[in-house]
Amino acid sequence: MYIRSNLRPLLIWRMSRKSLLFFFVYNALICYLYGPLNVHVLDIPWQPVATLGTAVAFYIGFKNNGSYDRFWEGRQLWGSIVNTSRVWTLRVFDFVQFPEGYPDGPDVHELHRRLVYRQIAWCNALRLHLRRQTAERWDAEVAPFLLDPTDSAARFAANPPTHLLRHQSKELLDLNRTNLLSEYRQVAMMQTVQDLFNFQGGCERIKNTPFPRQYAYFSFVFVWLFALLLPLGLVEEFDSRLALGRYHVWLMVPFSVLVSWVFNTIEMVGHISENPFDNAMNDVPMTSICRSIEIDLRELLNETDLPAKVEPVDDVLY
């Protein structure tokens, strides 16, 4: 996620230099053919081009709204994951308690730590699952939080975060069977697990359902069709209505390039917002969110050796 209030000019140039170069060369070629070479057959009436531009503007606006909705839903889901992770931790502390006179058994603090750490592992596993990075980053970013050796098998599952939640559910059942967790408290904690499943399913729905290609593809086609027709409609307008001398027709080039660049940039903004979980510059900063969850939950465990918050790299927070 880009965090600066304004985009750096160099970044804008990197994003649009190829299209700008194409627009400049194409528009200059049309102007050269129309002016010095006197090929006036190229010009077309301006009114149809203006009508097409209006239609394209509405179309790409519709696409951008849909793309932004996907990004914002993804960010809301991860915001809910943050809050629910905190709720899970508090319920672990308040609900999972050894009754007085209970026989010697495992340290309650270690039990709390295992349940909380598994939640941190689930957050990281979900992030890696959405980014398709499980194979290469599991050992470094998930395995350290799996205190139960049986949890490690989740790595080889088709959906690792689902298996981690299943292990949470199984441990709650075991605690209920040993009278360490009342039935009412087990149901309350299972509701939290269900909420996590719902948030995971929402993220997977966005990830596994691409933005409809008919909207994305034709938006690209219509913008470039308009950009190709624009100089043909403008060249005659600049030639006939501006009495600025014999070379005034060349003013069409910067104006046409500017309009084409604006339309193409709007279309590109919608394109880069389609998939908010690809670890790109404008995506949901899941790495930073997972680190914030880890810090909050480990602090609730009274741990002091906490990791630092994720810092932006080149103004981008991942």
Image (tube, rainbow, N blue to C red):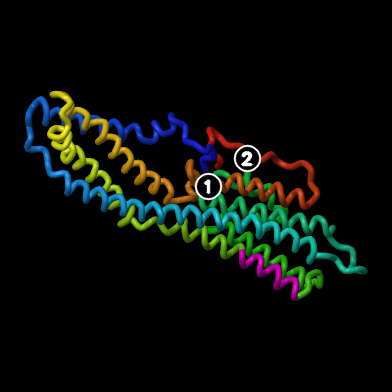
**Picture layout, residue 187 above or below residue 312:** below
Residue under the image location 60 percent in, 61 percent down:
163
Q: Which residue is mark 1?
A: 133
| Label 1: element kind | loop
Give the magenta part as a residue range.
Answer: 184-195
Which residue is at the front of the view, 287 or 236? 236
Q: Please, what is the dominant secondary structure of the magenta stretch?
A: helix
At label 1, the amino acid type is Gln
Give the residue at the far front of this rendering. Answer: 243
Tell whether 85 sits left or right of 22: right
Q: Residue 143 at what x, y percent from top left?
A: 65, 49
- Residue that carries the numbered disc 2 in the rendered image: 310
Check disc 1: other Cα within 10 Å, few if <14, some if 14-19, many if 20+.
few
Image location of residue 64, percent across then percent down: 39, 52
Q: Nearer the viewer, mark 1 or mark 2?
A: 2
Q: Quick one: label 2, few (<14), some, or many (20+) residues within 10 Å? A: some
Question: What's the residue at 66%, 57% (across, down)?
Answer: 83
Q: CA distance from mark 1 to mark 2?
A: 18 Å
Residue 136 in the image: x percent, y percent? Answer: 55, 44
Which residue is at the far bottom?
A: 183
How many badges with numbers are in the image?
A: 2
Specify the quadrant of the image occupied by residue 165: bottom right
Viewer-proximal residue among 55 and 206: 55
Instruction: Name the spot of residue 17 as percent of width and height, x first.
Output: 34, 32
